[in-house]
Amino acid sequence: MYAPIGVFDSGYGGLTILKQIRRMMPEYDYIYLGDNARTPYGSRSFEVVYEFTRQAVGKLFSMGCPLVILACNTASAKALRTIQQNDLQRWGEARRVLGIIRPTVESIGQVSRTRHVGILATEGTILSQSYPLEIEKLYPDVVVTGQSCPLWVPLVENGEADSMGADYFVKKYMDGLLERDPQIDTIILGCTHYPLLLEKIKKYTPEGIRILSQGEYVATSLQDYLYRHPEMDERCSKKATCCFYTTESVQKFMDSATLFLQEKVDVRHTVLG
Ligand code: DGL
């Protein structure tokens, strides 16, 4: 039986999530699908992100995945709920799609002392209000300030994360966030690409502010989900394989994936839509 866990992202960013998931649960099989030909999703409309994400989830199900993780905040913000409500039934009751916003939000409860939290994310994720809405449900006392960082994903995707240009744009958005709420003591990196800018982000973050990357929280939450759902866990195959699909050029994906994973990967091309 080959029934891998599907991990989907608009591009390379989800690799930061996959890396943590594999570190915590190396025995499972995984398929990573990056829609690199149509990335970025961050500035696209609700309808387009939903349609692209629906196609990707359908593809991963057709490849045999019983469970798909939307390892993309924009897709989790704009498409997860609609897919769960409208599409899952058609694909079969036993399939599941999980997002990464809820597990990230759960983590802030114990962390923030001032109860002032900042979110750095794409324009789409910020405009969707998904983070403040989820935080409100779990921690109504927390004040949330969002800052969209539209140039961070292009910087990472173009291999410019360590450049001087990146310094300028990291400082610009960090200052923008902290000027709007100087009481923030916890910042969520609400975009899967941002861990690649972590060193620069830390450089422009005043001492005492905690920065939360999502990968670890998402991995812990997935592990917990499979523990609580043994019927799903039994359906996931465990031969410790991982294969990668991209909608763009295989060579391009291979070169860039190394930046994110620090390992060589086996990549195939696929078409969505
Ligand atoms: N992976 C996306 C996210 O986490 C960012 C990249 C994009 O805009 O497509 O929001």
Image: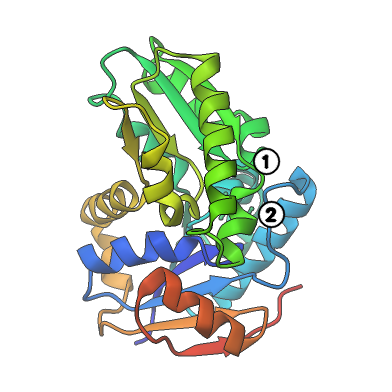
Q: Which residue is drawn at 33% across and 66% down?
A: 19
> Considering the numbered disc 2 on the image, is that residue within a helix, a strand or a loop?
loop
Amino acid type for the residue under numbered disc 1: Gly
Residue 129 appears in which quarter of the rendering?
top right
Q: Which of marks 1 and 2 is nearer the N terminus?
A: 2
Tell me the residue that label 2 is attached to. 41
> Residue 99: x, y in percent?
47, 49
Q: Please tell me which residue is depicted at 62% across the width and 43% down the height of the picture.
A: 122
Residue at the image position 58 percent from the left and 30 percent from the top: 147
Residue 163: image location, x then y, percent: 53, 58
| In the foreground, 157 or 131 | 157
- Most foreground residue, 123 or 101: 123
Q: Looking at the rendering, in which quadrant would you find the C terminus?
A: bottom right
- Left or right, 10 with respect to 210, comes to right
Mark 2 beta carbon near ligand 1 (under 8 Å):
yes
Distance from Cα at disc 1 to Cα at disc 2: 8 Å
Q: Give left or right: position of 108 versus 41.
A: left
- Dots 1, 2 in contact, CB < 8 A: yes
In the rendered structure, find residue 124 and report the number of the disc placed on it.
1
**Residue at the location (60% across, 52% down)?**
165
Count neighbours of disc 2 (C-alpha within 10 A) and say few if under 14, some if 14 to 19, many if 20 or more.
many
Mark 1 Cα-neighbour bin, 10 Å: few <14, some 14–19, many ≥20: many
Q: Where is residue 18 in the image (x, y as percent from the top left)?
A: 38, 65
Total marks drawn? 2
Does residue 217 sit above or below 247 in this rendering? above
Q: In this view, does 95 lie above or below 63?
A: above
Is 114 displayed left or right of 171 in the figure? left
| Whether residue 235 is situated above or below residue 176 in the rendered picture | below
On whether ligand 1 comes within 8 Å of the CB at mark 1, the answer is yes
Asked if residue 39 lies left or right of residue 141, the reply is right
